[in-house]
Image: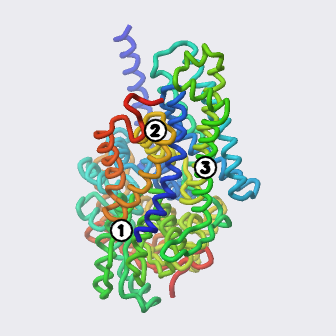
Amino acid sequence: MVPCRLKLFALAALTLTLLGGLGSADPASAQVKIGVLMPLSGKGASYGAHQQVAIKMFQDKGEALKLVIYDTRGENTDAINLTRKLIGSDHVVAIVGPLFSGESEVSFPVAVQGKTPIITPTSAKPGIAAANRPWAFRNALTSDKLDGALVDRWLAANPGIKKVVILVDTKDAVSKSDGSIVLPAALKERGIAILDSISFQTGDIDYSAQVTKAKSWNPDGLVVAALYNEGANVVRELRKQGLAQPIVAGLGIMDPRFIELAGPAAEGVMTVNDFWTDNPDPAVAKWVAEYKQRSPTPPSNAAALMYDTLDIVRACAEKSGLSGKPDDLEKDRERMRDCLAKVKDYKAPVTGNTTFNGEGDALRQPVVLVVRKGKFESVR
Amino acid sequence: MLLQQLVNGLMLGSTYSLIAIGYALIFGVLGLVHLAHGEVFMMGALIGLQIVLWMKAGPVVALVGALLGTAVLGVLIELIAFRPIRARNGPIFAPMVSTIGVGLILQEVATKAFGGEQVGFPHRLEPVTWRLGPVTISSVQLLILGTSLVLMLALHLWVTRTRMGMAMRASAESTLTARLLGISTDRVILVTFAVASALAGAAGVLVGLSFNAISPFMGIDMGVKGLAIMLLGGLGNIYGAMVGGLLLGAIEVLSVAYLASSYRDAFVFGVMILILLFRPQGLFGVGRVDR
């Protein structure tokens, strides 16, 4: 019974493989298979929901790419396993994702080992792509390319600031690097004293103790490095305990939910990014309008970067003439990698001129933003 | 700063107390741990939030609604997950395992119904704050403290002064003897579940109001902490749970203020282990396990 069943199974598998092979032999219908990793539940589910809308928009524009999408729940272990799965059993040509720096840090080496190009649309902790050459890329500006401009603008708008307290999420990779390395360096360079660096952790609910501690230092300004949920509640608690000082926040808070959760407390908070919803640029405005037709909330940068990353991957797949055949998988992966490495002044549909530098990181013009009347606005 | 930190700790601790009391009540009567209690707390927060969103009601209506809603939920849990197993004389730990199932089901249902995202109460409920010298106190904090104290006092009076409370204490002493004396222990258990769950529901709304972080997963950590506090206070001892909650809240806040927040939980549970090493029966436990 068992061997018989096995034989049947083998036969079925063989037929399927043959059929699959025949299907993709037709050049007109050859699709390039791309894996996508993003958080659809758990930590960062809001980012993921935005990216999902962007993916739908991208897919409606054409079917050049066949996407295999997995939910990482924002967890490092899931990101590793799913990266392995995409490379080993789904045989994708390239992977778009994962979203968080913590996830990227651990799944990039897996992709390098599997000789598969991987490109995160969002992770911003410096040095992650550089450590995983030549297969890892990022279509995101690392925070060290953003924070200098941010601190400059913040100090220009609030010239009285001489000493600050930093509140940092030490459990989230990009917030930790932002709040304990990148932002402090940028502040010290400009002669600002850091009185204290107070930590909390992703998922905490009570920030009263940290805020009371911050208050006791009597700083001129406050620096928050966190993701949108925690960032919003920290800002809310700061205002609740009567700290009215100017607040500057790392790029992790950049999501419409930050304003939704923090409410009036979000007013005046400054941050930095390369995409913002109310950008008057006609191409961006058109994209945002189209996005808003599909979603009740305006797009976040996670959505814009996902859209652009898919577009870059599509352009590369077309330009380097990938075959999409299973036999050519290794060659396709190499060609995709070589094309990504050469991306220069590419006109990305939403975030504009994009170049990948020698470390695999994107170069673009950052914009400093401030929350005014419940919206992110660019600081002119 | 110390004074303000103690106030912070008192606020956090009083919500811990409300959750821990629920564990203690149920443990007292059944000798079992209700592992979905954290999820009942979460449902309380979600019910309160829905009432505010749909009825445009204020925090007090939300609180009352959550109290009633979770009381019903608690009764259902007893009827569905505890009683049938007890009636069939299942192994002693079987009902506990079935509450793990209840907790997971509640989490999934809440995720499907309301999404996995963290949400907060609308900003029109934003608290008013007062400054009293070095200390800042908000209206929500007063509501938390007031509600917790009133509920704890009501519980104390109910347990000590009413016939039902007396029946509950008798059942806690020995279910068999209580039944022989003509007490309907099944009814006592049902009421205990209702009261315990209502307290957790109230705690859910209070935590939601003050920390603005309501999600289907908010009950996991709180559940573990409540359980630990019950153990710290003395198994099944409701006064131990009250004091234990306040104590743990204060320790937690002070550890953040004077040590590092990364060690917040490690420190809290470290202190707990230390106390239990010296007083294995818990702070308020008597020589033998006091139920």
Q: Residue tagged by mark 2?
A: A23
Say which of marks 2 and 1 sits in front: 1
The residue carrying pointer 2 sits among few (fewer than 14), some (14 to 19) or many (20 or more) residues within 10 Å by Cα, namely: few
Could you say where residue B278 lies in the image, as x and y percent from the top left?
A: 29, 40
Tag 1 residue: A198
**Quadrant in the rendering for residue B29:** top right
> Label 2: chain?
A
Tell me whether circle 2 and circle 1 mark residues in contact (CB < 8 Å). no
Mark 3 and mark 2 in contact? Answer it, CB < 8 Å.
no
- Tell me, yes or no, whether dots 3 and 2 are on the same chain: no
Mark 1–mark 3 distance (CA, rounded to whole Å): 29 Å
Q: Which residue is mark 3?
A: B45
* Point 42% across, 57% down: residue: B250
Query: Quarter of the image containing the N terminus of chain B?
Result: bottom left
Q: Is residue B256 above or below residue B48?
A: below
The tag earlier along the polypeptide, 2 or 1, is 2
Amino acid tagged 2: Gly
